[in-house]
Amino acid sequence: MVVLDILVVLDITAADEATALAVQSELEQWWATSGAATVRRTPGAPGVQIRVYSDLRRAGTQA
């Protein structure tokens, strides 16, 4: 039996804050995540970014 630690960092870029948070919410359905992300904006660049940490070994709220 092989046990893998599958921890990932997801940097998500979206057109707006609502879309970024919707993506985060969907990820929480499938895997355990770090929870509410801080929305970041880069001056002069379009869109927003969030960073989500996820443990793919643990089920999210949909399980």
Image: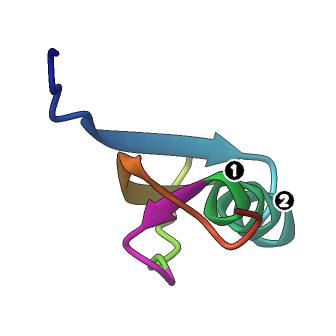
Residue ID for mark 2: 19
Relative side of 8 to 35, left or right: left
Q: Name the mark nearer the viewer: 1 or 2.
A: 2
The amino acid pointed to by label 1 is Gly
Res. 47 mark: 1
- From which residue to which does the magenta span run? 31-36
Relative side of 57 to 36, left or right: left
Instruction: Please name the residue shown 47% across and 68% down the image.
Output: 40
Relative side of 33 to 12, left or right: left
Looking at the image, tell me whether mark 1 or mark 2 is earlier in sequence order: 2
The image shows residue 10 at horizontal and vertical percentages of 42, 41
- Viewer-proximal residue, 56 or 20? 56
Query: Would you say residue 43 sits in the magenta stretch?
Result: no
Instruction: Please name the residue shown 77% across and 58% down the image.
Output: 26
Q: Secondary structure at mark 1?
A: loop
Instruction: Please name the residue shown 17% across and 26% down the image.
Output: 4
In the image, is residue 19 above or below residue 34? Answer: above
The amino acid pointed to by label 2 is Thr
The image shows residue 2 at horizontal and vertical percentages of 15, 16
